[in-house]
Image: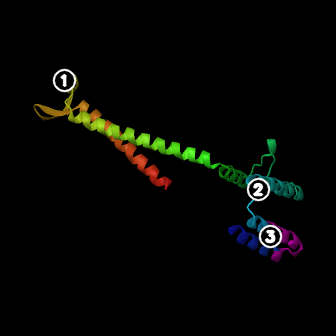
Amino acid sequence: MENRDINKEFSKSAKDSKSEFTEIHKKMDEFVLLLAETEPDNTLLQELQAKFNSAIRSASDTTALGPYKKVKNNILNEDGDSELGQLLMMNDLDKSAHKRLATWQIVGMVIRLIIALLLILLGFGMIIMPAPPYFEMFTLFYLNPNDGVTIMDVISLIVAFIGVYLVISIINRIRIRK
């Protein structure tokens, strides 16, 4: 629908400025209306785009269409063409491939979430459980003469915070996807 409105604006401005090209604008309006009424498939759209680009290139002088330079294998070097091609390729995905991709993404997130929860559990478990004496000989801060913060406690906190970071990043990815 937006294309029709934009096309009408272009055709009105063109009619005002150059009345000699009104027939071309009428045909273009008919073409846009025909495309809006039918739903062509991707291959037809690509063929029509290639025909239109070659007709524009052949009808204009060589300096008017500088961005449309031909490269190897008839690929056009213009941003609009590449964006349309990408959209057509993305739309061409079949439903089963899309479902498989979505399934694997969900499975990957669930596995990451399980790993993150296990890291948190491991980190706090390492803090709560008594450590072997060879780990407790490196005490960083003494809380009392018999107890303090050891290197094992610091490593346990690092493991737990990595798990928390993974959980937060997974939740952010889920929010971004929705």
**Residue occupying the point 81% across, 69% down:** 30
Q: Is residue 61 above or below residue 148?
A: below
Q: Earlier in the sequence, mark 2 or mark 1?
A: 2
Q: Position of residue 176 (x, y in %)?
A: 48, 54
The majority secondary structure of the magenta stretch comes to helix
Query: Magenta stretch?
Result: 15-31
Q: Amino acid at mark 3?
A: Asp
Q: Which residue is mark 3?
A: 29
**Residue occupying the point 84% across, 58% down:** 56
Front residue of this view, candidates 135 and 105: 105
Tag shown at residue 37 = none
Circle 1 residues within 10 Å: few <14, some 14–19, many ≥20: few
Front residue of this view, candidates 169 and 125: 125
Q: Is residue 2 above or below residue 57?
A: below
Residue furthest to the top in view is: 134
Tag shown at residue 133 = 1
Circle 3 residues within 10 Å: few <14, some 14–19, many ≥20: some
Q: Position of residue 26 (x, y in %)?
A: 84, 72
Q: Position of residue 151 (x, y in %)?
A: 25, 30
**Pointer 1 with pointer 3, Cβ within 8 A:** no
Element marked by disc 1: helix
Quarter of the figure with residue 136:
top left
Q: Amino acid at mark 2?
A: Leu
Q: Amino acid at mark 1?
A: Pro
Magenta stretch contains residue 152: no
Mark 1 and mark 3: span between their CA atoms? 85 Å
Q: Which residue is mark 2?
A: 45
